[in-house]
């Protein structure tokens, strides 16, 4: 599964509520300096790539990007997914986006940590195992599969250095399983989690454009985005702007870019359809788009900042 890991001690220290949904990580409540949220550059993290794809499918393309933009604005962006996990364990951040077993590792390393799956906003699936067609040693292969699925085979996942969720609950009745009450609790909690229908084909069709758009607009320009967002939230808190002005500027900050496509010379918007149609081309020519998206994002953030300053004086 995919979710986020929280450090309850850090949440308490910062006076932050327990996040339960993806949009909680994008909330103005988590707008802090230094950042209390952690996530990773999707061009350097396959698990965070999948997390961002889940958010885009759970909320839809446009709203999903608004959430990703504000989540990034609230976050410290790491170069690797395990660095996010370590940041939560050490209390550098209060919450970080993680795959499940990174959350379990964090819980084992620091009892103040808890892995959370946003119910109705994520996916829960199993690692596959299969018998190859025309396998030369079919009976041995079938025996191996049966062993893997047995309590004896499932005990491998309980090793603290592996910390993966077993598929067979009978493993928790073994001596080794009885020592992993933390994993048993996590296993039981998954039974009540409502998962979204996830379209793997759609994720693959837009994966490269998603990764590079995120990098250009949310990673490479992060310092400016974070600064503008913090100033916007502070202006609302101090009463310098109204709630309506805040929402208007927030919408401008998070809207999808319109840019001149270097491939066609036409002005286009970063829609789902455009991302699908141009995924392979962006994969072959990433630098062209990184440069254009980076420049367009900086211009948008500065426009929001200038409008904010024109209101507050």
Image: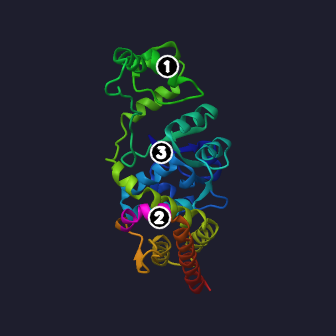
Report, in whole angstroms, how far the alpha carbon at label 2 lies from the one at label 3: 28 Å
Circle 1 — which element? helix
Residue tagged by mark 2?
282
Q: Nearer the viewer, residue 131 or 229?
A: 131
Pinpoint residue 218: horizontal percent, then vertical percent: 55, 64
Q: Main secondary structure of the magenta part?
A: helix
Q: Does residue 204 appear to the left or right of 3 in the view shown?
A: left
Q: Which mark is residue 11?
A: none
Gap between marks 3 and 1, in whole Å?
24 Å
Q: Nearer the viewer, mark 2 or mark 3?
A: 2
* Magenta-colored stretch includes residue 302: no
User: Which residue is identified by label 1?
Assistant: 155
Q: Quadrant of the C terminus?
A: bottom right
Q: Secondary structure at mark 3?
A: strand
Quadrant of the rendering where the N terminus is positioned: top left
Q: Nearer the viewer, mark 3 or mark 1?
A: 1
In percent of the image, x 51 and y 47: which residue is there? 46
Q: Which residues are magenta?
A: 274-284
Q: Is residue 262 above or below residue 207?
A: below
Residue at 41% in and 18% down? 144
Residue 162 at x, y = what percent?
A: 56, 29
152 over 185 or under it: above or below = above
Residue 167 percent location from the top left of the image: 40, 27
Question: Which residue in the protein does label 3 denote?
Answer: 3
- Image location of residue 287, percent across then percent down: 56, 67
Upstream in sequence: badge 1 or badge 2 = 1
- First along the sequence among labels 3 and 1: 3
Relative to residue 166, is residue 300 depicted above or below? Answer: below
């Amino acid at each position: 599964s995919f979710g986020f890991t929280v450090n309850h001690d850090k949440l308490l220290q910062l006076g932050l509520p327990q996040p339960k949904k993806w949009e909680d990580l994008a909330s103005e409540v988590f707008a802090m300096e230094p950042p209390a949220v952690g996530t990773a550059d999707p061009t350097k993290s396959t698990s965070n790539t999948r997390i961002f794809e889940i958010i885009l499918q759970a909320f839809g393309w446009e709203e999903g990007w608004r959430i990703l933009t504000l989540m990034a604005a609230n976050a410290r962006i790491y170069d690797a997914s395990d660095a996010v996990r370590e940041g939560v364990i050490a209390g550098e951040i209060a919450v970080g986006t993680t795959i499940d077993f990174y959350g379990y590792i964090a819980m084992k390393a620091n009892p103040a940590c808890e892995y959370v799956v946003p119910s109705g906003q994520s996916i829960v699936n199993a690692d596959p195992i299969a018998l190859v067609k025309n396998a030369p040693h079919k009976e041995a292969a079938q025996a191996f599969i049966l062993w893997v699925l047995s309590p004896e085979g499932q005990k491998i996942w309980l090793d603290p250095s592996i910390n993966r969720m077993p598929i067979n609950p009978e493993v928790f009745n073994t001596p080794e399983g009885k020592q992993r009450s933390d994993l048993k609790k996590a296993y039981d909690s998954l039974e009540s989690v409502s998962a979204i229908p996830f379209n793997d084909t759609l994720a693959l069709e837009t994966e490269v454009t998603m990764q590079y758009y995120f990098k250009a607009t949310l990673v490479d320009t992060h310092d400016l985005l974070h600064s503008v967002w913090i100033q916007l939230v502070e202006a609302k808190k101090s009463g310098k702007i109204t709630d309506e002005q805040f929402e208007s500027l927030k919408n401008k900050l998070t809207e999808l870019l319109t840019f001149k496509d270097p491939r066609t010379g036409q002005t286009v918007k970063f829609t789902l359809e455009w991302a699908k149609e141009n995924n392979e081309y962006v994969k072959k020519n990433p630098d062209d788009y990184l440069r254009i998206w980076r420049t367009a994002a900086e211009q948008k953030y500065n426009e929001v900042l200038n409008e904010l300053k024109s209101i507050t004086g």
